[in-house]
Image (tube, rainbow, N blue to C red):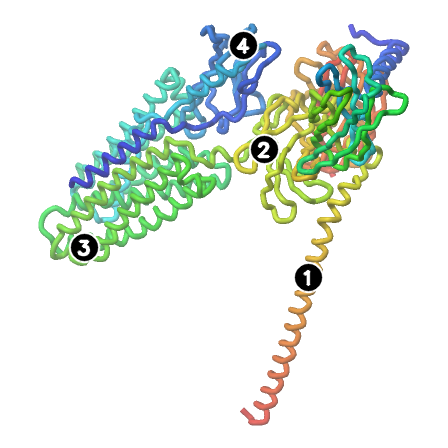
Amino acid sequence: MVRHWTAAQATARRSAVAAIILLAAWTPAAAHETKAVGGMRLTVGWGEEPAFSGFRNFVEVDVADGAGHPVVDLDGGALSVEVSFGDERLSLSLLPARGQPGKFRAWLVPTRPGTYSFHITGMAKGQSIDVTSTCSPETFACVADVSDIQFPVKDPSAGQLADRLSRELPRAEGAMAAASGARTLALAGLAGAVIALGAAIGFGVRKGSTGR
Amino acid sequence: MRWRVAVVLALAAIAAASRDAHAHAGLRLSDPLEGATLGDSPAAIRLTFSERPDVALSEIRVVSTEGVAYHLGRPVPVAGDPLSISIRLRTLDRAVYTVSWQIVSAVDGHTTTGAYAFGVRADPSRAAAAAAAATPTVSLFGVFTRWLLIAGLVMLLGAGAAGVGGFGGERDVMLGFVGASFALLGVALLLVMQARNTTASLTSLLNAPVGRSLFWRFAAIALAGLVLLLARRQDPQRRRPVMAVALLAALTATAIHVTGGHAAAADRWLVATIASQWVHVVAAGIWLGGLAALLLSLRGAPSTSKADVVRRFSLIASFALIAVAATGVARSAGELSAWGDLTATWYGQAVLAKIALTFLIAGFAAVNHWRNVAAAAADLRPLRRAGSSEVALAVCTLAVAALLGSLPPPAAALRDPSGLIVSGTDFGTTVRVRLTTPSNQPGPNRFVVNVSDYDSGTPLNPRQVSLRFTPLDDPRVAPTMLELKRGTGETFLGSGSNLAFDGRWRITALVEQGGGSVEVPMEVETRIAPQFVSAFRPQGEPATYTVQVENAGHVRFSADPERAGPSIVTITCYDVLRDERPIEDIVVTVRVGDGPPRQQSVTRKSPSTFVSRFAFEPGANRITVIARALDGSRLRAALTLDIDR
């Protein structure tokens, strides 16, 4: 016998599944990497995860002491982050987040999907900080292209449009140069044809006049 | 004479040195993957090869590090995948296991063996290294048997051609008889070698395609031998028709031999490749076997009739040499994947040796053609000396040819797999990505990616390439990632079970290079095993089609009307007992001909029944249903309706 779900049971089941999915989706900063430096713990990741290319985001560093309490005052120290993507580097200051003790942020817009690394340096409570973290499934989220969640129409990102433009302009110039060359060739061919026609007419007239 | 002996010894040394060359690297894919650490025991081992294996002659063994065997019964073919075989397993405990296999190709009869290791909740890396070290070698005995067969065929062809072409003499029959004996011994030893390698009984071996091919070769050569026996009793003046029959039998034996070799494994221009190989062997037989027949007839004092025969053969041999060279170049081009293979692989080095030897023979042939043939009426000794040298070198060349027949051609490793092949470009049209996999079925797979410039097609060498797998028919299943490693050249590769189940998948390649990156979306559809469909056509009502989904239930389709144009398709899902099965999610797609699949909108009519408005087009309309039941199980059913105009 088939076990049929009643309408109420099915609704309750669907609601539970939806709630779980929503809860999972709304959990902020789900994947960060925590590193111990001296007596402190630094937790590093994107402020908004999953991170999408072309959308404003921030590098978030949670500084806590050994007991897990947020470190509010760096005792005159300062932190900075060097964000790297392939050969590209960008240095930014990590500034305290307003109303969120122990959290430091550096804002940026990641313009390409892929693998980002954060190199955090500076001083905190007299302790030298030098920590590097690279995105991966075990650390924090890598930046993804936004097209997967675009609906109903998938629009190209600014980066994709820039790539396309940088490719299409040389192609257009190449096509114009080829067209120009073809036009020159056509004119030369036309001129040759006119000369040949003239020569043929001239030769015909001469042949007619000599009667041969 | 000394240098001839030296050449033979040198080639024997080359053949002996090649014992360490790897045999046919036939394994394309395994499930579980090589070096994998599994969380639980697999139910079976599945191996996919580059050529169709002969299941009856193939063996798979699965043993633990303690030497306990875990395989059950014999290997069986995999439905819908002729390149794969599988074997069932007992439940595997926590340990490392070695899978050793011995496969006989149903295409060219070559035996391949190998081993790999995987672990169940254990690290298999040490055992994997030991298994890799157990990779097999080319057998010198195998090379010798092939040499016997090829040399015998060449003698037989030469004797037949000499008898028919009239450039031989009394000893043609003897040469042919020796050739037939060599070839028969070669075939018999090949049969013994196959039986020894496979541990199969002679009956099962002869029932397999490899055994049948050897049997027919034997029969054709034996027929040629019997005809030669008959020719021996004939008056030499009336021998020509009988020798023509022997030649025909030798040509047939050569054709059977060629269809059981490397040429038959070609994935393109199969008929042309086999024909080219056949012409190659036949031309070599007429040239070199014919030369042997000619030399046997040139004993004694010179005469004008002998000089006429020499001139006639010289012309025939010139055409045969051209045919050997042309078909040899064509065959080498087909079996080598790049110029570098000539020096980097054993196969390429053997090809180079064969070319060098052929040049040497051609050199002697040129001396004969332009100098000794003209002087044949007065003095036959120079011609006999140069001709004997040609024959001695031919013996070595045939040994190299036998070695080539035992080595895996480099191009075989690069032949287009029967798996998935898909290409794509990024929106910015900066790169092209080509993705290939050896298997087109769900489960473990190897992903090979090549990236090239969009405009110039130049291969690119990006910093990193990763793949994201998104199931299109199962929206609740989260995408997975696979980071690829740099392979040889500009290739990136990685293995994983990311295509976890059958259906449509979007594979997005993330290509990172310099300070930028691009995403290249591609779409693939994994193959579904053949499903049993039963049709019921009640009078005056639309036909219903019930598709059996293995171990999951049934899906019933009904199209009203079943013709081109708008139609309403009703889909009902059942469990294995044919009770209606409540479905949580359903995705329905339709594909017309070879076009892309289109997703249909679906309306629920009951917990297990859905309807969808279709617009059928003339031709094959393939409807695919992917349904997730409330208990989490998944049904995928496909039905093809042939719609009339």
Kind of residue sitting beneath label 1: Ala
Tag 3–tag 1 contact (CB < 8 Å): no
The image position of residue B299, as x and y in percent, is 12, 46
Q: Is residue B507 left or right of residue B389?
A: right
The image position of residue A91, as x and y in percent, is 75, 34
Q: Earlier in the sequence, mark 2 or mark 3?
A: 3
Kind of residue sitting beneath label 3: Asn
Q: Same subunit under labels 2 and 1?
A: no
> In the structure shown, which secondary structural element does the residue marked by tag 2 occupy?
strand
The residue positioned 67% from the left and 13% from the top of the image is B551
- CA–CA distance between discs 4 and 2? 33 Å
Q: Same subunit under labels 4 and 1?
A: no
Labels 3, 1: front one: 1
Q: What mark, if any, has residue A177 been given in the picture?
A: 1
Residue of label 4: B89
- CA–CA distance between discs 3 and 1? 64 Å
The image position of residue B354, as x and y in percent, is 33, 41
**In the depicted view, which residue is nearer to us: B645 or A62?**
A62
Residue of label 2: B492
Tag 4–tag 3 contact (CB < 8 Å): no
Tag 4–tag 2 contact (CB < 8 Å): no
Quadrant in which residue B215 is drawn: top left
Q: Earlier in the sequence, mark 4 or mark 2?
A: 4
